[in-house]
Amino acid sequence: MSADPAKVPVAASGASVKASRLGLRTVALGYLFLLLLLPVAMIFYRTFEHGLEPVWKAMTEPNAVHAFWLSIELVAIAVPLNTVFGIGIALLLERGSFRGRWALGLVVDLPFAISPVVVGLALVLVYGQAGWFGTWLSEHGIDVIFSVPGMVLATAFVSLPFVARETVPVLHELGTDSEEAAATLGANAWQTFWRVTLPAIRWGVVYGVVLTTARALGEFGAVSVVSGRIEGQTQQLPLYVQDRFENFDATGAYTAAVVLALLALATLLAMNLLTRRTRSRRAV
Amino acid sequence: MGARSASLLGRGLLGIYLSVLVVLPIAALLARSSHGGLSAFWREVSSPEAQAAIKLTLGVSVVVVIVNGLFGTLIAWVMVRDEFRGKKVVNALIDLPFALPTIVAGVVLLALYGKGGPFGVDITFTRAAVVMALLFVTLPFVARSVQPVLLELDGSAEEAAASLGAGRLTVFRRIVLPALTPAIISGIALSFARALGEFGSVVLISGNLPFKTEVGSVYIFGQIQNENLPAAAAVSVVLMLFALVVLAALTLFTRSRSKHVR
C-alpha cells in the first residue's frame, strides 16, 4: 500500500478535499432542507392528511371562492397596468434623455425600500377618510380605502418595479442599432417599437410579468391595511389565509395556503423555463 | 395622431399613474410625519414601545444578514463548485421564497416549528421565530448575488496559489473571498432592506408582543388600527430612511468600485 511514498500525501489531501466538500454540501443542503423544503412539504402533508374531502369542502367555501376570484381580479387589473407602464418606464430610463431621470429611477425602486405596511399607510393618508382627498372622494360617493379600489392601488404599488427592472437590462443589451436602422428605412416611432423593439425585448418583459403576477398574488401587508379585511368582500387569498388561521380553522388556512404555494411553484417553473430561453437566445 | 403627440400623451399618463400610485402617497406620509414639527416627530419615535420596536427590527435584521452572509455564500459555493444528483431542482427551489406569498411563509414555518409540530419544538411568540421568518423570506438574496460571480471566477488563480503551497483555507481567504465580497455585500444590503420592512411572514409567528417580539412593521400596523396615525407615520419614515440609506450606500459602493476597476 505504501509502495510509493510520494503519493501518500496527495491521496490524503484528496480525501480531505472530498470530506470537506461533502461536509459543506451537507451543511448547505441541511440548512435549505430545514428552513425551506421541510416546512413547505409539511404544509402539503398537513392539508391532505385527512383525505381529500375536507380539502374540497374548504375550497368550495363561499368566502374562499370569493377570496380566490378577488385575487384574480386584482392581478387582472394591476399586472396589465404595471406591464404597460413598466415598459414605458424602462424605455424612458434606458432611451430617454431628460433631467430628473434619477428621480424616475428612485420612484420605481421605492417599493423595494418600503415596508408593505407603510405602503398601505401612505395610501390611507391620501385616499382615506382623513386623507388629502378623503372629503372630496366621499362627497362624490367614491370608496377607495376599505374597498376594492384601494386594494388595486396597494397591489399595483408593491408590484410596480418588476417589469421595468427586468426590461431595462434587455433594452441596454439590445442597443439602438436596429431601431436606428428601422427609422432610416422610414418606420415611425410607433412602427419601430412594435416591429423592432418589442419583439426583441419580449422575454425580458414576460419574465417581469411573471414576477409581477407572483408579487400581486401574494401581497399581504399593504392590502391588509387598506382593505379593512371584510369577509366575503375585501378579503383576497392571502388575507383569507390569515383570517382562517386566526379563527383556528387549520384546514381552511392550509388549503388556501397550498393553493397559493402551488401558484408559487408554477411561477418558479415559469421563471426557470424563461431564463433557459433567454440564455439560449443570448447564446445564438 | 402623430408619434410625437402619442409619446407626449404616454408620458403624461405615466406621470399621472406614478403620482396617484407612489408620489402622492409618499408625499402625504412625509407631510403627516412632520406635521407637528421635529419635536412631535421625535416624541412619536422615542415612545418606549416605538423605541423597542425599532431596536428589535434593527437587531434581528443584523442577525439575519450575518447568517445570510455565511449561509448564502456557502449555498452559492455548493451550487457552483459541487456536483450531486438533484442539484438543478435544489437550485431552482432557492428562489421559492421570492415566489411564495409572505403569509404562506409564516403559516408554513408554523406548521413545522409551531405548537403541535412533529419536532415537539414551539418557537411561536419568540424572537427566534422572528429571525427564522426573516431568514426564510431573505434566503435568495446573498446566494443569488454570489452565484454568478463564482461562475465567472475561473480556478486558475486558485490553482496557482495552491501550487505555490497555499493551504485551501488560505486560498479561500486570500483569493476567493476578496472576489466575492462585493456580491456578498450587495446581497446583504438587499436582505437588510427587506428584513427592515417585512410584515406578512412575521405577523402570525411572532405573536406581536410589545417590547418582546413586536417589530417595526407590526408596530406601525397596530398604530394604524388604533387610529394613531402620527405615531404610525413617524416610525414608517424611520424605517424608510434606514432602508434608503442602506440602498444608497450600496449604489455608491458599486459605482465607486466599477470606476476603480476601470
Image (spheres, rainbow, N blue to C red):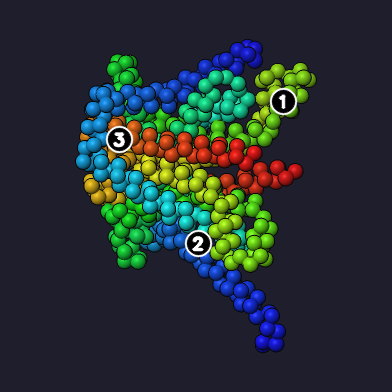
The tag earlier along the polypeptide, 2 or 1, is: 2
The quarter of the image holding the C terminus of chain B is top right
Q: Chain of mark 3?
A: B
Q: Secondary structure at mark 3?
A: helix
Host chain of mark 1: A
* Three-letter amino acid code of the residue under disc 1: Glu
Mark 2–mark 3 Cα distance, whole angstroms, equals: 37 Å
Q: Residues within 10 Å of mark 2 (few under 14, many from 20)?
A: many
Q: Amino acid at mark 2?
A: Ala
The residue singled out by tag 3 in the image is B235
Whole-angstrom CA distance, mark 2 to mark 1, is 46 Å
Q: Dividing the image into 4 quarters, which one contains the N terminus of chain B? A: top right
In the picture of the structure, the residue carrying the numbered disc 1 is: A179
**Marked residue chain, label 2:** A
Q: Quadrant of residue B225?
A: top left
Q: Position of residue A37 (x, y in %)?
A: 46, 59
Q: List the residue tagged with mark 2.
A: A28
Q: Position of residue B164 (x, y in %)?
A: 66, 65
Q: Please say if A57 is above or below B249.
A: below
Q: Can you see residue B77?
A: no
Considering the numbered disc 2 on the image, is that residue within a helix, a strand or a loop?
A: helix
Tell which of B79 and A223 is nearer to you: B79
Does label 3 lie on the same chain as label 2?
no
Spatial CA distance of label 1 from label 3 is: 48 Å
Closer to the observer: label 1 or label 3?
A: 3
